Image (spheres, rainbow, N blue to C red):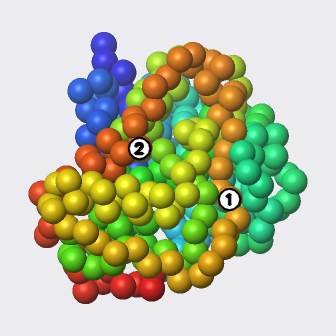
């Protein structure tokens, strides 16, 4: 019998990719909001009772970024999480996608380990909701917090997500822009899918893991990589503009705990991943609007 997996947020960046990348491996369910309202506690319990999933992969979340802020962010994110957390008797395990925002954006340090949680309590609604879920997960029998840092790939918000934004700018003959350079721990979405499969198929020893690359790349170097890829594929030579000198606060995690359990894992080479993404945008130009690429300047 095939492994039955519920993926929440199947129309979002991470969820949509996981549905595509894991479809050949599991029996995937990814109901649209019209089929299942995740903030409706009765509907969620009935859905879980009916389907009896082996795994729930919870990617759905309201977000707050430079583009938009989801309404009732804290309340709805907590409600979605606990509608699944309170029904652990109805599924095998739950993989909750947390965020480094749990550590509090004001207190970031390089290569933060899992134990850095509680060094500071997030002041923003998004980070605080993730923090609440992370604290609950520490003692939950069937829930595992996969804490994400930077994830990139197709279907992400190209208006504000740096690598996709840079690819779309290069394809549109526009300069690649940075507000300020910063070292960032980026994980390619294909790697996230393979790592998620490991957590679905194996019994983790801990309840919280930093799911990240464990190494950093600064945005200026990544911009140059995009420019190099654009030159090789399209013959274009996009300029690179940096608005502010110096370095912003590093955003990175320590993935030692995860790799100690998984064993040897070879992450996708960053330049190859960027080439994949650039090529995808070149073949899907209709998904982005050049007129909206100046949002972050």
Q: Nearer the viewer, residue 270 or 193?
A: 270
Q: Nearer the viewer, residue 246 or 84?
A: 246
Residue for badge 2: 270
Q: Residue at x 45, y 85 (%)?
A: 297
For this orientation, the residue located farthest to the right is: 119
Instruction: Indicate left or right for 151 with 141 as reference.
Output: left
Is residue 214 positioned above or below 108 on the image? above
> Where residue 143 appears, x then y in whole percent?
63, 34
Mark 1 secondary-structure assignment: loop
Is residue 283 positioned above or below 3 on the image? below
- Neighbor class of circle 2 (other Cα within 10 Å; few <14, some 14-19, many 20+) is some
Q: Nearer the viewer, residue 253 or 220?
A: 220
Q: Residue at x 71, y 55 (%)?
A: 102
Instruction: Indicate left or right for 233 with 297 as reference.
Output: left
- Quarter in which the N terminus is drawn: top left
> Where residue 283 appears, x then y in whole percent?
12, 57
> Where residue 22 appears, x then y in whole percent?
31, 32
- Neighbor class of circle 1 (other Cα within 10 Å; few <14, some 14-19, many 20+) is some
Q: Residue at x 21, y 77 (%)?
A: 173
* Residue 88 appears in the figure: yes
Q: Nearer the viewer, residue 54 or 171?
A: 171
Q: Mark 1 or 2 closer to N-term?
A: 1
In the rendered structure, are the residues bearing label 1 and label 2 in contact, judged by CB atoms less than 8 Å apart? Answer: no
Residue 182 placement: quadrant: bottom right
Q: Which mark is residue 99?
A: none
Marks 1 and 2, how far apart at CA: 18 Å
Residue for badge 1: 250
């Amino acid at each position: 019998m095939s492994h039955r997996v519920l993926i929440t947020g199947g129309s979002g960046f991470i969820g949509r990719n996981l549905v595509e990348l894991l479809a050949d491996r599991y029996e995937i369910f990814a109901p649209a909001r019209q089929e299942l309202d995740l903030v409706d506690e009765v509907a969620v319990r009935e859905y879980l009772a009916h389907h009896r999933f082996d795994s729930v992969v919870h990617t759905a979340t309201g977000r707050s970024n430079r583009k938009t802020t989801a309404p009732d962010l804290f309340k709805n994110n907590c409600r979605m999480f606990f509608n699944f957390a309170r029904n652990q008797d109805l599924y095998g395990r739950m993989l909750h996608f947390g965020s480094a925002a749990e550590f509090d954006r004001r207190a970031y340090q390089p290569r933060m380990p899992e134990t850095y949680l509680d060094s500071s309590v997030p002041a923003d609604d998004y980070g605080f909701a993730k923090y609440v879920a992370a604290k609950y997960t520490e003692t939950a029998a069937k829930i595992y917090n996969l804490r994400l840092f930077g994830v990139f790939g197709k279907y992400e918000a190209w208006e504000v997500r740096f690598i996709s934004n840079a690819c779309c700018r290069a394809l549109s003959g526009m300069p690649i822009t940075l507000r300020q350079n910063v070292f960032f721990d980026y994980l390619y979405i294909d790697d996230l899918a393979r790592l998620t499969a490991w957590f679905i198929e194996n019994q983790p020893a801990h309840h919280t893991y930093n799911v990240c690359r464990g190494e950093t790349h600064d945005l200026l170097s990544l911009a140059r990589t995009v420019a190099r890829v654009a030159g090789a594929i399209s013959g274009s030579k996009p300029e690179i503009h940096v608005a502010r000198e110096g370095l912003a606060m590093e955003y990175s995690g320590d993935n030692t705990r995860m790799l100690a359990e998984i064993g040897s894992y070879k992450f996708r080479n960053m330049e190859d991943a960027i080439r994949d993404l650039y090529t995808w945008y070149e073949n899907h130009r209709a998904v982005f609007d050049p007129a909206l690429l100046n949002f972050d300047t």
